[in-house]
Image: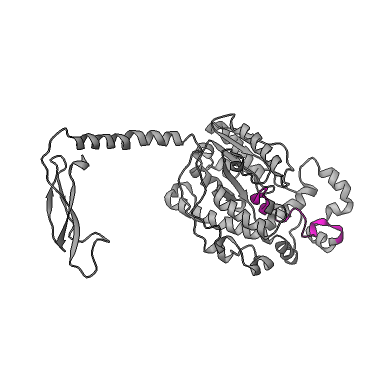
Amino acid sequence: FFLHFLPALEVLPLGTRQTFPLHPFAGTLRTSPAPPSGLLESGSNSVVVVRPRLQTVRMPSRRSVIGCLACLVCCCVLPLTALVLREVDIDFALDSVDLDSPLLASSSKEMEGGLKGPQDVAPWASELMLPLQCKPVFPSRVFYNRIPKAASSSFKSVASFLSQENGFFHESYKVYNDRGRWEEDEERRNALRISNVFGQDSKVLYDQHCRFINFTQFGMKQPTYINIMRHPTSRAISTYYFARTGDHHARDVLRDKLGERADWNIDDCFAHAEKCPFANSSHPAYNLMTIFFCGHHKDCDTVGPAALARAKTNLAKQYFFVGITERFPDTLRLLDILLPGYFKGANSEEYIGHRLNTNAKRGEAPSPATVSVMEKYNWMDLELYNFALVLFERRRALCVKDFPQSFSE
């Protein structure tokens, strides 16, 4: 229909109100007295408008047939294509991110001193602009390489409940301590094993305590990555007390090994650093999130600036969503919106307050002096956490605007 009337350009004086005859079925089109934005030339009193050129209507014609075919494509083929895309994975890489940008790297001063406190946001993070959106997606495979002591047990439990309601297969790997860096052959074997799990159903959510795996380097389909991060100091404190007093099978063995040190609080540990490995900056509780997001690349063999840079890159380009433990209710609300095929219904009181594996016997909070030392040890995780927090808050702001009914004030 629209191809039947080829437009012609005409310059009209400002304020002109003109009626253009169109096809009999279309009525009339009137120009606005004010010029459309962007059409007015500088210093000109005229505006360019589109005047349809009258032609003799001959139905059917070649142009009419072409127009009808175009309508069929728009109305039928494209919706069918959208339905197909619901069953395939979507490439969530944010290709517009400049990997060489200083926004994905920190100054040497920041690297040496870390962030000043939990409330600080690094300057490069506050200036970061990424093309985040608040639109639901429907991948067939989701991988949650869960970080220990970051509400992972609670989140895994929510996913297990929702798997029954939303009709997806949830597989949780049973090996807990699997955090080391794999060589290429071992990474390939694990990628193949996990890919086989994803092939068991049309919708699969798989979780495992392990580092980021790059499936594409082995010619396999990359799953949709999600994760949850916790403030590094809180996560380290939780790790310390959970090992000594938490509900896990190795607790009694560890307490027997530690003797009287099993009842030390964190300040006691740092006061006797020569007898307490946790007071050493090389303890694996520190900067664990950095190596989880870094993955198995050779840069991740040693926790340092190269590992942090790769972790930021992976977080920005390979992860569809990274939640925040301290924003656990909003994390579930966002997932309800963004991944409804898996988390529809997560935005309910039944799950919002659902927390498991919390340590009721956790000890005293450390002193400010001890926290300051821990933050220096944990400076890479602090940078990565603040990086993720900025992205999370921006995504949340978008979804609050678009879906205000999904968020409680």
- The spot of residue 251 in percent (x, y) is 81, 44
Magenta residues (range) = 274-297
Using the rendered view, name the quadrant where residue 274 is placed.
bottom right
Looking at the image, which residue is at 56% across and 66% down? Answer: 123
- The spot of residue 157 in percent (x, y) is 63, 39
User: Is 216 left or right of 256, judged from the image as shown?
Assistant: left
Using the rendered view, name the quadrant where residue 12 is placed.
bottom left
Looking at the image, which residue is at 56% across and 48% down? Answer: 318
Task: Work out which residue is located at the far left of the displayed protein and give it.
Answer: 56
Asked whether residue 362 is in view, the answer is no
User: Is 397 left or right of 22, judged from the image as shown?
Assistant: right
- The spot of residue 300 in percent (x, y) is 69, 52
Q: Is residue 319 magenta?
A: no
Q: Is residue 193 above or below residue 182?
A: above
Asked whether residue 338 is in view, the answer is yes
Q: Is residue 353 above or below residue 43?
A: above
Task: Depth check: give the residue in front, 247 or 119.
Answer: 119
User: Is 402 left or right of 164, judged from the image as shown?
Assistant: left
Q: Is residue 289 magenta?
A: yes
